[in-house]
Image (cartoon, rainbow, N blue to C red):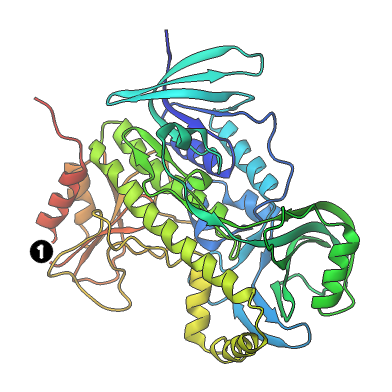
Amino acid sequence: MANPVGVLIVGAGPVGLTLAAELTRYGIPVRIVDKAATRTDKSKALVLWSRSLELLERAGGVDRFLAAGIKARGVRISNGRQTIGEVGFDQIESPYPFALMIPQNETERLLETRLEELGCRVERQVELLRFEARADGITATLRDAAGREETVAADWLIGCDGAHSAVRHGLGFDFAGSTQPSDWVLADMRLDGLGVPDKLDIFWHRDGILAFFPIGGDRYRVVADLGPADGREQRPSPTLAEVQALVDQRGPGGVRLRDPIWLSSFRINERKVRDYSAGRVFLAGDAAHIHSPAGGQGMNTGMQDAFNLAWKLALVAKGAARASLLDSYSVERSAVGDRVLRTAGRMTDVAILRNPVAQAVRNAAARIVLGLSQVQRRMSDTLTELEIAYPDSLLSVTTTQAPHGHALPAAGERWLPVAGDPIGSGAAPRFAVAGPGDAAALLSAIFPDLVDTRARPAPSEDGLWLIRPDGYVGLVAGPDWQVPAERYLAAIAAEIGP
């Protein structure tokens, strides 16, 4: 006899933990398993960007992350002697105008603590062996540390199990892409002589890039590229002396490294699946996309996969929405994955230019464009992931009479959050209504399982906005909002049976 469960999540990294916490918050039965015996003890991903912090606030517990990390207020690019340009975060429109520097092992600890507070625990040393997907559910076989096998019946299976995902392999999905033919080194250690850790420091040296990322106190992440691999096997992990030599050669001078915590070499993989789902099986995070670490987008993009999927899955699991709502997950997040892959790749290509003429052109251009406020704003919105939007989603609808204007949020765009009052908080996912005073009451009376009763201030008195539980605009309607709003929600709501 199979043991029944609502959602089986494979993988208890940041993505799986985020998804499990969101679903548990919504009252959906979850099992989350991981074949590792413990959480990672490595720093790995180091930054939580503004958009992820906004989503964590609506999930509850963002203050514990803020207390555990340090705030970087921008990015500074130098050539080792002179500053080429800076990108500041202070002017971005978010309650969190900074990069929160926090090691992944600490992020996982805080997410797991939150999950346990909600009444769900990670089952460790439990491995997914195989699964069978049907139209009405999933049957999965798990094996624990003692070798015992267990059959689990689940309504949905989610693969959050990383680049070597067993769920992705079980689906037979192609992980298309390539490994870049260049070597990199990574070192987490303590250092002296860099100054105040208020920014992410990047050095464009003629021999390659060198970057310093503050972790806390005098602890930093140091990353440098070593140039083309030329067909060689991947380099062994560097020594402290080798990293010190790179810092002496490419850095500002006077920086001394000590007490290494983690020394490693790596190559950049850029791979992605085409589809993030097949029937009742979904992929999220590194199981669906991996890319250059430039920009620090990987973990954040994966966690935002989880936030996107969770509210949709909760509404369908509770019978409040049609199963077709889940089709929007792959469409929306695959488009984001494509964009992050392109952006990270371009950032890497610019940073590792080797041709002296190309380097000179790059540096001269950067000095000019990074002084422009519009460029700074665009770059900061890209890094912080505030510009993520779903304009081409079937869930993004604008009526012909909808108010237009640069300052008005369009369908698919992020709704500007208010600190301390995030849309999407609470025990049930609901659409928020920003419009005429009676709109929220009227629509919530018709669709009580989909719409929040509380009205939100509208940016224009001539329109109505329906905001999704993840804080993105779904519908923008004009003065005659009632029919299009009801039609929009009826297309999502579960059909009423006989």
The residue nearer to you, when weighing 248 against 115, is 248
State the image coordinates of residue 465 (x, y, percent, origin top left). Answer: 25, 61
The residue nearer to you, when weighing 256 against 484, is 256
Which residue is under mark 1? 480
Relative to 122, is 154 on the left or the right? left
Which residue corresponds to the image point at 57% horizontal and 51% vertical from the top-left? 62
> Residue extending furthest top?
1
Crowdedness near tag 1: few (<14), some (14–19) or many (≥20) residues, C-alpha within 10 Å: some
Quarter occupied by the C terminus: top left
The residue nearer to you, when weighing 164 against 325, is 164
Q: In which quarter of the image is residue 395?
A: bottom left
Q: In which quarter of the image is residue 267?
A: bottom right
Which residue corresponds to the image point at 46% horizontal and 37% vertical from the top-left? 168
Which residue corresponds to the image point at 35% horizontal and 48% vertical from the top-left? 330
State the image coordinates of residue 148 (x, y, percent, origin top left). Answer: 59, 12
Which residue corresponds to the image point at 34% horizontal and 47% vertical from the top-left? 329
Query: What residue type is disc 1 on?
Result: Asp
| Above-or-below relation of 34 to 266 | above
State the image coordinates of residue 450 (x, y, percent, origin top left). Answer: 26, 43
